[in-house]
Image (cartoon, helix red, strand yellow):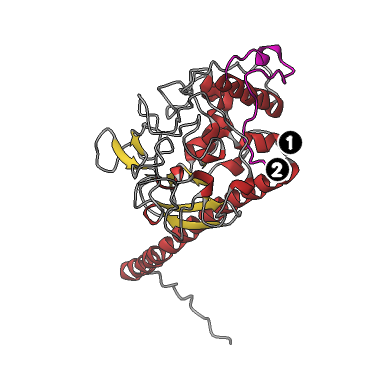
């Protein structure tokens, strides 16, 4: 007769064993999360650098097809080049550029009802919107994520709903000045770029009729004043130190600190596109300090009255004050396109 085997009870986890398992899992997570965060940060940085490199290559391609010209808005006050009559009625250089910008946007977005911009002489979209000229040359639809830093959350959000932006549906949007979201000029914000072209790509290197000077009322540190502006007409062969001169930079340093820093802070660190299409990570205060283009014979420096808006970076200055005076550095290179920012001392452009 076969023996009858009794069923054995399965032993469960004790509370201590369960706590040990949970502790091990928590330890593994604490070890892996920083590594995952660092990998994610490095990935976004790589995308950012790739974006800038693509824009540099596109600029050189444009230049090779257009007699060595640097991409820039080119319409003048007496040009009538648009198929839309309302965009042929400009009486000044800034108005012509505003009409060219809207002409590009109407063509590249298919939004033929975009409003004509009423542009005053203080409105200067060249730093944030010159990429649109290259986009038209490449027949690119808009908006395009390649012009947005992957950490520029606001721009990426606006790109998804440009018409919603114009209707004021985003709580974090420009709110004052001629470029506010509820003005005709504000239409271009969802089509703007995180990356900014240095002003010397659009105006004379010093003196002359163009002043890429400091800041004016309202704290709009992006705007640049154009006196009797003779804009455009800059060429790649005007650049003397292509590997040492900044061509394009982000308005903010986003990758290397918990805080998003405006580019002109000394401790800001970010990828920079040079004129030879190379991209390297540089600290702002390693750059030459720059000058005032309208006073090339002096040692004075262009200063920026940085007054951040709530949507911009952390919305506050590092000091906690409403505004801070910051040096311009590579944004206003001494000598303009003829000067250099990194790897050497400033050239003598007639300063004392």
Residue 70 marker: none
Which one is in front in this view, the residue at disc 1 or the one at disc 2? 2
- Counting residues from the start of the chain, the first of labels 1 and 2 encountered is 2
Which residue corresponds to mark 1? 139
Tag 1: Cα neighbours inside 10 Å, few (<14), some, or many (≥20)? few
* Side of 272 where 269 appears, left or right: left
Q: Is residue 275 above or below residue 223?
A: below
* Side of 147 where 208 appears, left or right: left
The main secondary structure of the magenta stretch is loop
Residue found 55% across the figure and 42% down from its top: 148
Which residue corresponds to mark 2? 62
Residue found 48% across the figure and 27% down from its top: 226
* Side of 105 where 249 appears, left or right: left
Q: Secondary structure at mark 1?
A: loop
Q: Is residue 32 above or below residue 233?
A: below
Quadrant of the drawing holding the N terminus: bottom right
**Magenta span:** 68-92
* Side of 5 where 308 appears, left or right: left
Residue extending farthest bottom: 1
Residue closer to the observer: 24 or 302: 302
Picture coordinates of residue 7 (x, y %)?
48, 75
Determine the image quadrant of residue 139.
Answer: top right
Residue closer to the observer: 3 or 217: 217
Residue found 48% across the figure and 57% down from its top: 281
Q: Secondary structure at mark 2?
A: helix
Residue 71 lies in the magenta stretch? yes
Residue found 62% across the figure and 19% down from its top: 77
Picture coordinates of residue 75 (x, y %)?
65, 25
Determine the image quadrant of residue 78.
Answer: top right
């Amino acid at each position: 007769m076969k023996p009858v085997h009794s069923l054995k009870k399965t032993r469960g986890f004790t509370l201590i064993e369960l706590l040990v398992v949970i502790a091990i899992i928590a330890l593994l997570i604490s070890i892996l999360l920083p590594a995952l965060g660092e990998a994610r940060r490095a990935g976004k940085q790589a995308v950012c650098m790739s974006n800038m490199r693509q824009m540099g290559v596109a600029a050189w391609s444009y230049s090779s097809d257009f007699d060595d010209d640097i991409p820039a808005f080119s319409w003048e006050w007496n040009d009538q080049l648009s198929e839309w009559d309302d965009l042929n009625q400009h009486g000044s250089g800034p108005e012509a550029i505003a009409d060219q910008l809207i002409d590009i946007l109407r063509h590249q977005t298919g939004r033929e009802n975009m409003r004509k911009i009423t542009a005053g002489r203080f409105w200067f979209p060249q730093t944030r919107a010159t990429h649109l000229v290259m986009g038209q040359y490449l027949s690119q639809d808009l908006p395009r994520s390649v012009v947005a830093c992957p950490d520029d959350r606001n721009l990426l959000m606006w790109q998804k709903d440009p018409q919603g932006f114009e209707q004021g549906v985003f709580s974090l949007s420009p709110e004052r000045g001629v470029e506010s979201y509820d003005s005709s000029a504000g239409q271009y914000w969802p089509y703007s770029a995180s990356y900014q072209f240095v002003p010397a790509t659009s105006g004379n290197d010093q003196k002359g009729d163009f002043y890429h000077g400091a800041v004016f009322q309202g704290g709009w540190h992006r705007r640049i004043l154009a006196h009797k502006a003779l804009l455009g007409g800059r060429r790649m062969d005007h650049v003397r130190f292509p590997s040492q001169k900044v061509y394009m930079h982000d308005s903010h340093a986003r990758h290397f600190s918990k805080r998003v820093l405006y580019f002109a802070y000394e401790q800001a660190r970010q990828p920079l596109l040079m004129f030879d299409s190379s991209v390297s990570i540089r600290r702002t205060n390693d750059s030459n300090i720059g000058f005032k283009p309208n006073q090339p014979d002096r040692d004075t420096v262009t200063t920026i009255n940085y007054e951040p808006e709530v949507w911009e970076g952390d919305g506050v200055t590092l000091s906690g004050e409403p505004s801070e005076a910051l040096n311009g550095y590579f944004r206003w290179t001494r000598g303009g396109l003829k000067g250099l920012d990194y790897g050497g001392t400033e050239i003598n452009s007639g300063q004392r």
